Amino acid sequence: MNMTPVTGDVRQHILNTGQVIIGGKGFSAVGLNEILKAAGVPKGSFYHYFSSKEAFGEALLQGYFTEYLAQTEERLTQPGASHAERLLSYWAHWRDTQHHCDPSGKCLAVKLAAEVSDLSERMRCVLQQGTERIIARLAQSIEAAVADGSLPQSVSAQGSALELATTLYQLWLGASLRAKITRDRVPLDAAFKATYALLNLDPNRSLTQERSQS
Amino acid sequence: MNMTPVTGDVRQHILNTGQVIIGGKGFSAVGLNEILKAAGVPKGSFYHYFSSKEAFGEALLQGYFTEYLAQTEERLTQPGASHAERLLSYWAHWRDTQHHCDPSGKCLAVKLAAEVSDLSERMRCVLQQGTERIIARLAQSIEAAVADGSLPQSVSAQGSALELATTLYQLWLGASLRAKITRDRVPLDAAFKATYALLNLDPNRSLTQERSQS
DNA sequence: AAGCCCGCTAGACGACTGGTCTAATTAGGC
DNA sequence: GCCTAATTAGACCAGTCGTCTAGCGGGCTT
């Protein structure tokens, strides 16, 4: 009955299940059996949809970034806010979702980058393209924020928007990594504060309504 | 003949061999066999020196941080330089050693943090204490640099030295992570430039020739 | 309507590696 | 020679990824 070459149902279900498990335990530490058992899918099906574990990981990352970029796009274009407000909302969201124990909201880029980039060239490329696109998207918003006056002109004097976006993304990557170590939100709060500084914003005047609850 | 309770020779040899291999491939992806074969040590011996693979990883990280902190201490106290110069030399060294393919100079904190902190509580604690001590040491040098005038007073107006050190360390952590993805030095160069900005230093004026005292 | 086709499921199986532990071997001091 | 402790060899089984054959079952062709 299904004429579509991509059988989205089961395949996507394996992907979703795998994302949660691998996001929690890593790539090498998780076996196919564990994912397949959790998904209720027999092993035979797996190799119908994916040619290998590596190909599965590749698809996993690809899907993750597609989804992430879509969410980011939405957040950076939400109506009724300046571009600077949208950017800060993006990072506030990052801060609030990544601090330690979110079950499924784990950032696969943070979790898998170090492990996978030395393990699989194909997965590394997906990681590279994904992060590159995120940074490019942030740079675009930074430029727009300078243009609409919600970020001071002085930020563009220091360097290109792409450089700034790169720095900020890497700052948050590192903060998330350290948050995994400390298991608290201190690293992410530090990153949030540093973001203000790097954007030449007054840290005392909040652009967004921050929620500072534990 | 050896009365010392810790048999350092073989044990340390396993540790050294393991550090290179695990630094390259990760923790879960490497089996004891691989390390032991490379070290020329029979498998049975392993469990004489370490109670488990986890305990081995714990000792590995502990040794790594001890060594790293000693090197850092040396670099941050080298004679004939201001504290700011020493700090920048620390980061310049980081930039030059971590950009992609250093065989044994891999930073275990970057490589293992994400993978291990969800896998082993004991290893996570070592990671936490190690990074904490590094940050504290950096904060100490930042304070000294403000005191000796090699960093402008304005940096202490923005927040505590510990906050700044935290931000900078996380920035470099994230830059190293992204450098693993991109396999070039662009992320680390961006971090270096951002470090100047966060320290309120003029990016165009190299610190090595400026000796303006307060 | 009958038959076929093929996407998909099912899970046993192979060859191998994982970490762990017991039992044997070695070596040293007396 | 023995006794004790340090060290090693290898068995152990659960687990790994990936293969392979068998068969279900819905939709198309004729």
Image (tube, coloured by chain):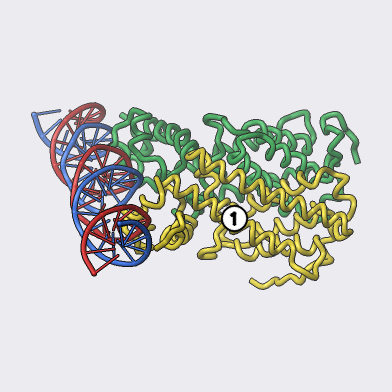
Chain colours: A yellow, B green, C red, D blue
Residue at the spot x=74%, y=67% of the render? A78
Residue A87 location (% of width, % of height):
75, 60
Horizontal relation, residue A195 to residue B26: left or right: right
Is C25 placed above or below B25 here? above
- How would you rate the neighbour count of disc 1 (Cα within 10 Å): few for under 14, some for 14-19, many for 20 or more? few
Horizontal relation, residue B73 to residue B155: left or right: left
Q: Chain of mark 1?
A: A
Q: Is residue B204 visible?
A: yes
Residue at the spot x=75%, y=36% of the render? B88
Horizontal relation, residue A45 to residue A7: left or right: left
Residue B27 location (% of width, % of height):
44, 44
Amino acid type, callout 1: Thr
Q: Which residue in the structure is indicated by mark 1?
A: A66
Q: Quadrant of the C terminus of chain A?
A: bottom right
Helix, strand or loop under label 1: helix
* The one of B52 and A158 positioned closer to us in this rendering: A158
Residue B53 location (% of width, % of height):
37, 45
Residue B150 location (% of width, % of height):
84, 39
Is B189 placed above or below A19 here? above
Q: How many marks?
A: 1
Residue at the spot x=73%, y=43% of the render? B141
Q: Quadrant of the N terminus of chain A?
A: bottom left
* The one of A150 and C4 positioned closer to us in this rendering: C4
* The one of B138 and A6 positioned closer to us in this rendering: A6
Q: Is residue A14 visible?
A: no
Residue at the spot x=40%, y=40% of the render? B30
